[in-house]
Image (cartoon, grey):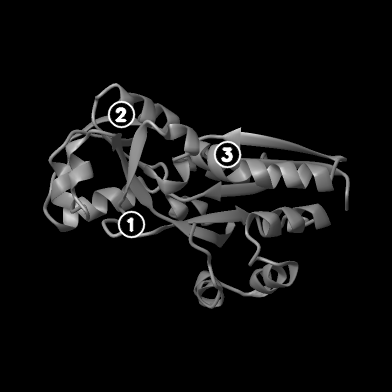
C-alpha cells in the first residue's frame, strides 16, 4: 500500500502551476513510490488513462473524451487578461468583451485549458476575437505578450510574482468558470497512496467520498452526488 509507482497524465498548466506543491508533499509522505508525469493534449491524456499507461488523468477540457473513466471535480478556476503596464486596457476599471475584442489576442490552443469557455463567451455576444497566436503553455503566451504581439488571456493560476512586468486584469466576470477534474478507470486497484494523492490534490475528495462515488451507478447519479460537494474556486 505504500510502495509502487504512480503515473499521472495531465496538461502543461496543471503540471506547471497546480501540481508542484502536491507532488512535493506526496513524495515526502511516500518516498518509496516513484511518480511519473505524462503531459499532453486532453485526447492524449484520455488515451493514456484508458489504455492503462496512466493511473490518473487530470484535465479541464474535452471531458467527453473521458467517458470510459471515472471523473471527479477538483476545483473551479477562471481567467485574466495579461498586458504590459502601459496598455490602454489598464485604464478601464471593469473590462467588457468589447474592450478585449478590440485588440489582437494571444491565448491557448483550442482544446487546452478552458479555451472553449473563452470562445463561447465571444460567440454569445456576436463578437469575433482576433486571435493572432496560440500556444499550450501560459509562459509562452506571456512571452509573446511581452513582445507586443497582443493581449494575453490565460488561467489566473498562471500569473506569478515574477510576472511583475505585466498587469493581470480580472476577467472572471467575462467568462464562465472551468472545472478541473481527476479521473481513473473503474477497474483500477486503488492503493492507499492513490487515495492520498487525490485528497492532497482535492481535499474535498476524501477516501470515503471517493468510495461512495465509485459505488454510484451511472453518470447522472454521480453528477448528483458531486453537485452536493463544495468544490473550491482558486
Does residue 222 appear to the left or right of 21 in the view shown? Answer: left
For marks 3 and 2 on the same chain, the one whose residue lies earlier in the sequence: 3
Q: Is residue 96 above or below residue 72?
A: above
Distance between the Cα atoms at labels 1 and 2? 20 Å
Residue for point 28% across, 60% down:
173
Q: Secondary structure at mark 1?
A: loop
Q: Quadrant of residue 146?
A: top left
For marks 3 and 1 on the same chain, the one whose residue lies earlier in the sequence: 3
Out of 172 and 75, give the one closest to the viewer.
Answer: 172
Distance between the Cα atoms at labels 3 and 1? 22 Å
Q: Is residue 159 visible in the rendered structure shown here?
A: yes
Discs 1, 2 touching: Cβ within 8 Å: no
Categorize mark 1 by other alpha carbons within 10 Å: few (<14), some (14-19), many (20+). Answer: some
Look at mark 2 in the image and give the residue it sits on.
Answer: 145
Discs 3, 2 touching: Cβ within 8 Å: no
Q: Secondary structure at mark 3?
A: helix
Residue for point 14% across, 44% down:
128
Q: Is residue 70 above or below residue 57?
A: below
Q: Is residue 109 visible in the rendered structure shown here?
A: no
**Which of the labelled discs sits on residue 15, or is there none?**
3
Amino acid at each position: 500500500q505504500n510502495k509502487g509507482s504512480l503515473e499521472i497524465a495531465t496538461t502543461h498548466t496543471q503540471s506547471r502551476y497546480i501540481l508542484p506543491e502536491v507532488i512535493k508533499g506526496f513524495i515526502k509522505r511516500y518516498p518509496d513510490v516513484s511518480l511519473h508525469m505524462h503531459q499532453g493534449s486532453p485526447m492524449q491524456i484520455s488515451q493514456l488513462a484508458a489504455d492503462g499507461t496512466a493511473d490518473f488523468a487530470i484535465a479541464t477540457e474535452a471531458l467527453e473524451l473521458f467517458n470510459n473513466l471515472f471523473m471527479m471535480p477538483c476545483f473551479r478556476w477562471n481567467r485574466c487578461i495579461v498586458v504590459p503596464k502601459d496598455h490602454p486596457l489598464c485604464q478601464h476599471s471593469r473590462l467588457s468583451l468589447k474592450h478585449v475584442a478590440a485588440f489582437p489576442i494571444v491565448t491557448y490552443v483550442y482544446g487546452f485549458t478552458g479555451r472553449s469557455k473563452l470562445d463561447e463567451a465571444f460567440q454569445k455576444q456576436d463578437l469575433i476575437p482576433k486571435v493572432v497566436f496560440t500556444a499550450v503553455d501560459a509562459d509562452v503566451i506571456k512571452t509573446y505578450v511581452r513582445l507586443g504581439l497582443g493581449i494575453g488571456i490565460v488561467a489566473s493560476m498562471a500569473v506569478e510574482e515574477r510576472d511583475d512586468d505585466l498587469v493581470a486584469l480580472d476577467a472572471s466576470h467575462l467568462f464562465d468558470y472551468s472545472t478541473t477534474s481527476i479521473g481513473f478507470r473503474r477497474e483500477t486497484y486503488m492503493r492507499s497512496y492513490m487515495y492520498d494523492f487525490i485528497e492532497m490534490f482535492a481535499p474535498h475528495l476524501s477516501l470515503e467520498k471517493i468510495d461512495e462515488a465509485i459505488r454510484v451507478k451511472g453518470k447522472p447519479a454521480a453528477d448528483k452526488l458531486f453537485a452536493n460537494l463544495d468544490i473550491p474556486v482558486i
